[in-house]
Amino acid sequence: MEEKQLVKLAKDGDRRAFEALAASCAKEIYNLALRLCGDRHKAQDIAQDAFVNAYKSIGSFREDSPFSAWVRRIAVNAWKNTVRYEIRRYFTKHDSIDDNYESDDGEMKKQYASSDPPADKVLEDRQKNDEIHAVLELLHPDAREMIVLRDMEEKSYEEIAAMTGLNTGTVKSRIARAREAFKQKFIKMQGG
């Protein structure tokens, strides 16, 4: 059944239609949440919150974008709410971005090329990843969102604009500011 038909049925209260829509993008939403928060359990909670909120507000879905893009926007907002909650509680703990993550094919483990790199290269790469994640944690949630969506999720400016409700020019300027903030914090962390 096509997405438009499923949306119409879901808006009419058909729970199975909504479940089919949710199943079609569940892994994508979870992966986005994982990249944003860096913690598998929190990512599951964020994805679940996103789908619960989508179910509650399916009647307001305007269908001017794909269902998955609409749920992605809800997931980003759920993540932002989580960050605000943690900031208020002075609680921030994130797993390494090197942890396993869920993909469309199931859980994936970090793998290296078959010709083993030198141990110092592996250690250097891991340290760099840890530093990048540490700098991401220092950024304002809006800046972090822009970097994750553009540089990690590799979304186009137009896709980000659709997900965030911003115009493309604003998205481009926010990404530029986020990258500059990242660069400054990275330099500062390096002792520069």
Image (cartoon, rainbow, N blue to C red):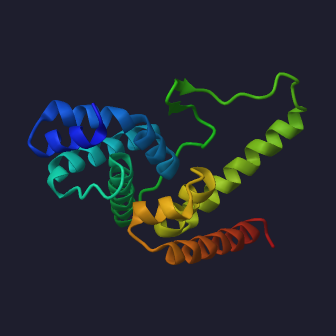
Tell me which corner region of the image, top left, top right, bottom left or bottom right, holds residue 42.
top left
Q: Position of residue 122 (x, y in %)?
A: 81, 37
Q: With respect to residue 186, does 167 lie above or below?
A: below
Q: With respect to residue 25, does 37 lie above or below?
A: below
Q: Position of residue 58 (x, y in %)?
A: 18, 50
Q: Residue at x 78, y 65 (%)?
A: 190
Q: Residue furthest right?
A: 118
Q: Residue at x 32, y 32 (%)?
A: 23
Q: Is residue 126 left or right of residue 92?
A: right
Q: Residue at x 58, y 59 (%)?
A: 150
Q: With respect to residue 12, does 103 lie above or below?
A: above
Frontmost residue, 128 versus 32: 32
Callout count: 0
Tell me which corner region of the image, top left, top right, bottom left or bottom right, holds residue 134.
bottom right
Q: Residue furthest left?
A: 13
Q: Residue at x 75, y 47 (%)?
A: 127
Q: Position of residue 138 (x, y in %)?
A: 57, 65
Which quadrant, please, contains the C terminus? bottom right
Which quadrant, please, contains the N terminus? top left
Q: Is residue 6 left or right of residue 152?
A: left
Frontmost residue, 119 versus 141: 141
Q: With respect to residue 118, does 65 lie above or below?
A: below
Q: Position of residue 98 (x, y in %)?
A: 63, 38
